[in-house]
Image (cartoon, rainbow, N blue to C red):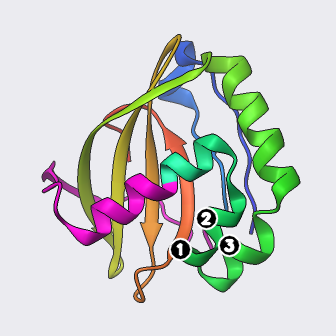
Amino acid sequence: MLHMKWLRPSNFAHSAVVLGVCALGIVGCSSTPPAAPDDPKVRLAKIYVSAFMAGATHSMEPMENAAVKKALTDQLVTSTLARLTAANGAFESQGSTRTGTFQGHDVVYVACHFEHGALDAKVVLDRDSKVAGIFMVAPGGH
């Protein structure tokens, strides 16, 4: 299932940007305090977000599960980045991380700073610690 709904910083409360594929149908999850930077899942999520923001799909593929590999094409990543940048300005840097869980799946939130605001990249990991989805949500959101 592929979802795309674009947002501008002015309407965070009403929208979520879904950048990838998540067959899990994540609706809510429990969140914990900031994540330990040496956590392997946090490192994986930060590397994945860096590759995504650079449009480096070849670097992303080894970290993805089969569903994401199939659905998250070069063209989709390129068009997604163009829309994300048009709405939020240039990607500038990553910030803090936090973790959560949903139905036995780990979720890592990576703060992303853009020229005109901030979003959290929500990286969902399956039971094999492969990326099962990536979403952009309002900072501190689920």
Circle 2 — which element?
helix
**Residue kind at label 2, given as amino acid type:** Met
Where is residue 42? Give x, y as percent.
29, 60
The answer to whether the residue labelled 2 contacts the one labelled 3, judged by CB atoms less than 8 Å apart, is no
| The magenta segment | 22-48
Mark 1 surroundings: few (<14), some (14-19) or many (≥20) residues within 10 A: some
Circle 1 — which element?
A: helix
Q: Give the distance between the C-alpha atoms of the residues marked 2 and 1, in whole angstroms.
A: 6 Å
The answer to whether mark 3 and mark 1 are in CB contact below 8 A is no
State the residue position of label 3.
68
Image point 49% across, 64% down: which residue?
26
Label 2 vs label 3: CA separation? 10 Å
Q: Nearer the viewer, mark 3 or mark 1?
A: 1
* Marked residue nearer the N-terminal end (3 or 1): 1
The residues tagged by marks 3 and 1 sit, at their Cα atoms, a distance apart of 10 Å
Residue with the most extreme bottom position:
128
* Rendered image quadrant of residue 100: bottom left
Residue at mark 1:
63
Other residues around mark 3 within 10 Å, as few (<14) / some (14–19) / many (≥20): many
Frontmost residue, 92 versus 29: 92
Q: Residues within 10 Å of mark 2 (few under 14, many from 20)?
A: some
The residue to which callout 2 is attached is: 60
The amino acid beneath tag 3 is Val
Q: How many marks?
A: 3
Residue contact at pointers 2 and 1, CB within 8 angstroms: yes
Res 29 visible: no
- Viewer-closest of 78 and 21: 78
Would residue 90 be visible to someone looking at this image?
yes
